[in-house]
Structure formats: structure tokens, C-alpha cells
Image (cartoon, rainbow, N blue to C red):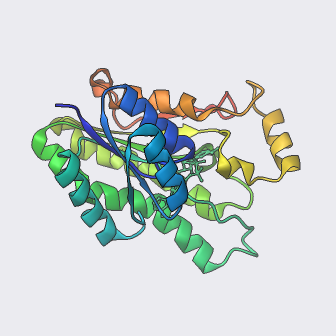
Amino acid sequence: MARVAIVTGGTRGIGEAISLALKDAGVTVAATYAGNDERAREFTERTGIKAYKWDVADHQACLDGCAKVAEELGPIDIVVNNAGITRDGTMLKMTYEMWKEVMDTNLGGCFNMAKATFPGMRERKWGRIVNIGSINGQAGQYGQVNYAAAKSGIHGFTKALSQEGARAGVTVNAIAPGYIDTDMVAAVPADVLEKIVAKIPVGRLGQAHEIARGVVFLCSEDGGFVTGSTLSINGGQHMY
Ligand SMILES: NC(=O)c1ccc[n+]([C@@H]2O[C@H](COP(=O)([O-])OP(=O)(O)OC[C@H]3O[C@@H](n4cnc5c(N)ncnc54)[C@H](OP(=O)(O)O)[C@@H]3O)[C@@H](O)[C@H]2O)c1
């Protein structure tokens, strides 16, 4: 039986590349998304990967959504917590809502998805959880106290949960991407982006498939001895 994976935010950007790479590796994939129905429909038509709509910040929606995926595709072996948003602004301009939305989605989503799937993985003695952090959670970033805190939290969450899964064959790891060529980075003003790229030793933005390859390894049988670790894929921009 093929393993079953859920990739949150798996219909576009880095998540789309992860969904495709896992499918290519023989995994049955469910990709989730938040609201972009048009993009999700096009994704499913093109890839044959089922898309499911729910908000990862909504605890009950994660429990219900994961139960539905398990019913339709089988028990969930792999979760890639990739869904993430930015609501940037300096402390003077950042509202409580901007803080809360990012914390609830980027970090709360990891908790919600783990609550829904980690017990079953432990019971079946095999599981893989990969959380997508960020270079900005490792190094901090001007105008991103919400995003940097949530992503930094992901790295702590990963190390703590990995200790609870290790004996039961469940690995929990994080990937910290640098700047990757997706819609999220396209939203950065061109002059700011130019300065960012100038600081990347490899001299370019990363590509989504370069993150996806890391996920496939961490989710493989061969990845079984890697747990509680953070893989930085950032073109040498931050050596953590
Ligand atoms: N791009 C980068 O340079 C970079 C660097 C470091 C880390 N990351 C992290 O990598 C991940 C993917 O980034 P990306 O650039 O690929 O993002 P993206 O292109 O903006 O795509 C985000 C995906 O997440 C989904 N999503 C957003 N909020 C959600 C929610 N509340 N519930 C469920 N799904 C939700 C979106 O669904 P809809 O399509 O419905 O909106 C979309 O599928 C994020 O966690 C991001 O923080 C990205």
C-alpha cells in the first residue's frame, strides 16, 4: 500500500512542488488549501492530486479534514505543514490581528495538524512530519515579528515533538527555506528583493523543487534516523 500524505497549502508555490515530488515518489497525496478554489481546481486537473479546502488555523476543521482524507485515501502516514502566510509591518504598524493571524496559521496550524494525525502515526509505528519553517525564523527579519516568531516557534515545536515520536517510528523535522521564487516572494517590492538576492551567496532565488527534494528525503524510509533536525535550504544566506 502506498503511503498517504497531506501537504497543507499543497496546491501552489512550494507546497505544489512538494505535492508533486511526493506523488512522483509513489505517495498518495492530499493537498490542502485555504480559499483559492480556481487554483486548486486547475492543480487537481493538471496533477490528478486531490485538493481539500480547510483553514489550518481552525482546530476543528483540521480534525474533520484529516478524518475525511483518511476515510477517502487511507490512514495518514505523512504530514507536511507547509501552509503559511505573511502579514508584514513594523511593530509600530502591526496590529494584534496581523500578529494573531500569522501565529494561528503558521504555528497553530502545525499543532492542529499534529493533533489530528500524530496519535495514529504513533499507533501504527510509522510516521513523518515535516514542518516548513523559514530563514526568517532563524535570523529574524525587519517588519516580521509575527512571522519570525511563528517560524522560530516551528523549530522548537519540531524538536519537542520529535522526542515524543522517536521510539514509535515517527520522525519530526523542519526545513528552513531561504528566499524561494513563489507568489509569496513575488509580493516583496522589487528594490527590496534585489537587495535580498545580492546577499545570497549562490546568487539567485531558490526554486520550489529544491525544497521539495529535501521533503521527499525526510519522508522516505532512508530518512528514518533523521529526527528533530532543521534542514536549511537557503543558498548559503544564513549558516545556522
Ligand atoms: N517563498 C519563500 O521564499 C519562503 C521562504 C521561507 C519559508 N517559506 C514558507 O514556505 C511555505 C510555502 O510558501 P509559498 O511561498 O509557497 O506560499 P504561497 O505561494 O503563498 O502558497 C501558500 C499556500 O498555503 C495555503 N494557505 C495559506 N493560508 C492557509 C490556511 N490558513 N489554511 C490552509 N492553507 C493555507 C494557500 O492556499 P490558497 O491557494 O487557497 O491561498 C497556498 O496553497 C510557507 O509556510 C512559507 O512561510 C516560503
Residue 145 in the image: above or below residue 170: below
181 lies left or right of 111: right
Q: Quadrant of the N terminus?
A: top left
Residue 70 visible somewhere in the drawing: yes
Query: Quadrant of the image for the C terminus?
Result: top right
Q: Of 12 and 215, which appears nearest the observer? A: 12
x, y (%) of residue 222? 30, 20
Which residue appears at 59% of the width and 78% of the height?
A: 97
- Can residue 132 be seen? no
Q: Looking at this rendering, what residue extends furthest in the right direction? A: 191
Residue that appears at 29% across and 61% down: 65
Q: Position of residue 66 (x, y in %)?
A: 26, 57
Residue at position x 70%, y 33% from top? 237
Which one is nearer the viewer's eye here, 56 or 134? 56
Task: Say which residue appears at 66% left-offset and 78% top-offset.
Answer: 95
| Rendered location of residue 70, percent (x, y) | 20, 51
Looking at the picture, tell me which residue is in the foreground, 160 or 70. 70
- Nearer to the camera, 6 or 104: 6
